[in-house]
Image (cartoon, grey):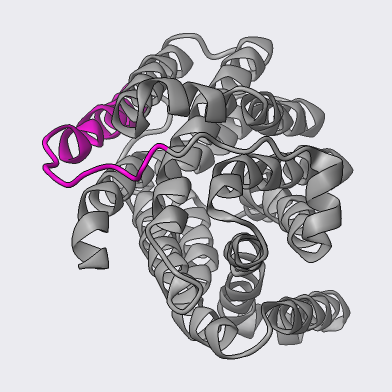
Amino acid sequence: MTLTRLLSPLTSLVIFILGHGMFNTLLTVRLSAEQVSVQAIGLVSAAYFGGLVLGAFINARLIIRVGHIRAYAAYASLLCLLFLLHGMVVEPVTWAALRLIGGFATGGLFVVLESWMLVSSTPANRGRLMSLYMILLYGSLALGQLLLKQVDPMVLTPFALCAMAATLSVVPLALSRVATPAMVAPQPVGVLELVRLTPAGMGSSFTSGLILGAIYGLLPLYFTDSGASLSRVADMMALVILGGMCLQYPIGRMSDRYDRRLVILLLCAALTLLALLMVLLPEAWREPIAGALVFLLGGMAFSIYPLSLSHACDELRPDQVLGANQGLLLAYSLGAMIGPLLA
């Protein structure tokens, strides 16, 4: 019954992320082809996460005021316009401004979907449902990377395809007959209060943002500067995201059986060891297993944020979930904004 209620938002998620996944890598590849500096590319990436931070203060109130489906439709329509504008005006400062607005809209879209998932779940199945959400998200992201191989990044067409995906993602929700989550008036949860109530949730959300911000924003550039072709860049980014997808369910199931804080700690420790291994291995040894290394990197890095959401919601009342989701997204976004600039 729970999965039936979640079919519409999950279908919308898949359609939107197909375009969104292609768009994220497309921007870096296009800017690199235009000979834009690394610093400017990092700024464009950071602007997106700055928009997520801005949205964290506004989106929850908007969703409560107009409802989940109307809010989603508004965000998706705005993103459709922004995707097209990126293809029409290729200039770093303009793109940074567009990415700021896009981060605001994308953050709102994710708050709609994630709050729908969290409110519809229970502590007994929350880890598995969030893992299903993340599997579909990362699977769609990976497919989006592969779609990039079929288009020319120097023309408007791929930007138009991303815009089409954003528009079409509204249809499953708009035609859904399933009731949206109960619109409980959210209990305001300040950032400091959230740190007190769930320090592990806030800390791991911030850490996840640091890591994923650098992965999304600069990993395609690393592959490009290493001499990889567009097809190779798409394949490697797809492997990163595929790793995140494949490990979601077993890690989510583990977190339902054991203390989620312990699972988060083990993930961070394993990610640290993996990162050291990637740095210390000689290039002659690293190259043959590069695909496996980035697969595991994605599996570890992409599993931290959903666990932080699930852990936080275990410790909060139902009327605090939407406010907490907003606060956790704020922590993630701050980390993700800092990550590309540090990298």
Query: Is 175 in the magenta?
Result: yes
**337 or 312, which lies in front?**
312
Give the position of the N terminus as an image quadrant.
bottom left
In the rendered image, is residue 329 in sight? yes
Query: Is 321 in the magenta?
Result: no
Please give the name of the residue rendered at 37% of the width and 14% of the height, measured from the top-left corner.
81
Toward which corner of the image does residue 264 lie, by quadrant?
bottom right
Give residue 7's position: percent from left, percent from top.
21, 56
Give residue 297's position: percent from left, percent from top.
65, 72
Give residue 57's position: percent from left, percent from top.
67, 26
Please give the name of the residue rendered at 68% of the width and 35% of the height, measured from the top-left corner.
188
Residue 275 sits above or below residue 148 on the image:
below
| Left or right: 198 in relation to 221 | right
**Magenta segment main secondary structure:** helix
Magenta stretch: give its range: 156-183
Please give the name of the residue rendered at 39% of the width and 48% of the height, measured from the top-left corner.
116
